[in-house]
Amino acid sequence: MPKYYTPAAIICLCFIFLFGCQEKSGNTEDIEKNEATKVENEDDSTSDLATEEEKVQQEDPFTLDAPKMPNGLEEVVAYPVGLFASKDTKVKDEAVQAALEAIPPLSENASEEELSNLLDYMYSLFKMDYDDPKVIIDSLSIATTPDSEEISKEEQTETFNVEIILDASGSMKKMIGSKSMMETAKEAIKEFASSLPEQANVGLRVYGHKGTGSNADKAMSCAANELIYPIQPYSESGLSEALGKFNPAGWTPLAQSLLEAQQDLSQYKGENHRNIIYLVSDGVETCDGDPIAAAKSLKESEISPVVNIIGFDLDTKDEQQLKAVAEVAGGTYVNVRNQEQLKSQFNQASADAYKWMTWYQKEQSGIFKNADKQKTSIYKLSNSWKNNISKEKYLISFSLQSLYTKKKITKEQELTTYKMAEEFYDLHYGLVEEMKNTLIDARDENLSSSLAEIKEIYNKNVSQGKIE
């Protein structure tokens, strides 16, 4: 990454007091007048100094809360997806304009450090969702096809099973933008399930989808815990039909859903099965269950699943319980606040599934057919990254223009900040091109030594490489 973040210049306030030499005089009165004038001048200088110091103290540095822009491709993947990461986002959108309006005006004498902080913040708003190159690298790392005996054994024992648990309590009616959280979750689940390898199994359990949020309906609602799409290979029509059977309704029996999931996956016991549970919830347990104990029981069971929890627009207080559940279950917790961030989490899950199933896909397609697929995937990855770069650069450019129009920055500050962004993205673009060429070369060589080198290039050069 370019070193455009130079330290702020230190401003020194120097006050030099010049006093002229007094002519010798035997008049005592004149001498006393001169002395009085000196004291008066000193008092005025001291007063001026105090006034300047007060002005300096009153000028607080411009600071926006945002992480630094990424230093390498791996950091780009890990960097949080922005609130305005949709490919349909426009600077004139009401939400974007509100975010820009909330930015305080910069001083005309703002430092480079303050301008780079502004750029960090703009990047955090518009940062897109980037596909992880490791998925392609993992597929390239399999240089030869397993022998038929090994394949036969793996076909009999290895499975990849995903169960999604969806909160269907009444609070999922909440609107985020033009859609309810439930509509957003259903769309993300459809997209996620369709992206899984065809050899993977997927299931969907919902809870709290009956009754209402009233005390009278609590017992019925807390008992509503249903595997509406049994664990099986993905069927678009079957899953769509299942998702259409319920709407947000009542309470939140979170703990019971984890215990039921343990039973759902009971046929996939042992180390030869990969079991993953994704729980999507916008709230904590409200049916008097103990989700911590349920998570512990699930983790210690023979199915040994990874339990990842996706909080949906939770506040800090509610987050604590779900974080604790994920920690006990040996999984991860993340809080998402919009559709793009939710999709991003499911995309990462899909990538993990592909990594585990790569050997099987390669065997099915054949070495040559798979090589063509790899080439297509590499170009698709490269084009996707470059499109994201162009979109972010476009949004930042027009947002800076909008800030200038709103008189929050000067024209010179707009141009300087855009130049920083342009330099970052130009170098970022070049690094993506180098990654694409390296992956293509590896695919063409198809030698295990070269493929091992590719992993090393990514792990060292890409993850540690700086855009500079």
Image (cartoon, rainbow, N blue to C red):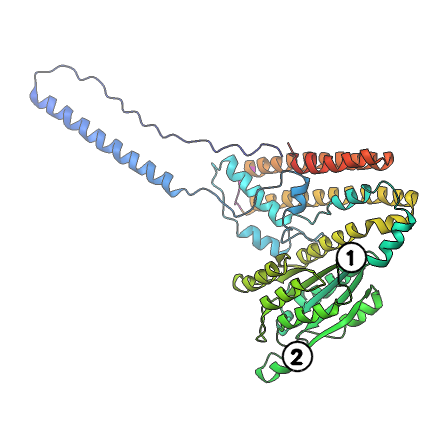
Report the residue at 86% width, 36% height from top.
446
In the rendered image, residue 419, in percent from the top left (x then y), is placed at 62, 35
In the image, residue 411 sits, relative to residue 334, either above or below, namely above
Give the residue at mark 2. Answer: 223
Q: Is residue 91 magenta?
A: no
Mark 1 near mark 2, Cβ–Cβ under 8 Å? no
Q: Which residues are magenta?
A: 407-411
Q: Quadrant of the N terminus?
A: top right
Give the residue at mark 1. Answer: 272
In the rendered image, residue 11, in percent from the top left (x then y), is placed at 41, 31
| Residue 180 visible somewhere in the drawing | no
Query: Tag 2's secondary structure?
Result: loop
In the image, residue 23 sits, relative to residue 405, either above or below, namely above
* In front: label 1 or label 2: 1
Q: Is residue 4 left or right of residue 24?
A: right
In the rendered image, residue 304, in percent from the top left (x then y), is placed at 70, 61
Report the residue at 55% width, 39% height from top.
116
Query: Tag 1's secondary structure?
Result: loop
- Please rate how many residues cluster around mark 2, counting C-alpha atoms within 10 Å: few if below 14, some from 14 to 19, many from 20: some
Amino acid type indicated by mark 1: Asn
- The quadrant holding residue 324 is bottom right
Amino acid type indicated by mark 2: Ala
Choose between 389 and 395: the one closer to the eye: 389
Q: Residue furthest top?
A: 24
- The quadrant holding residue 383 is top right
| Residue 157 visible somewhere in the drawing | yes
Q: Earlier in the sequence, mark 1 or mark 2?
A: 2
Report the residue at 82% width, 49% height from top.
358
In the rendered image, residue 154, in percent from the top left (x then y), is placed at 85, 54
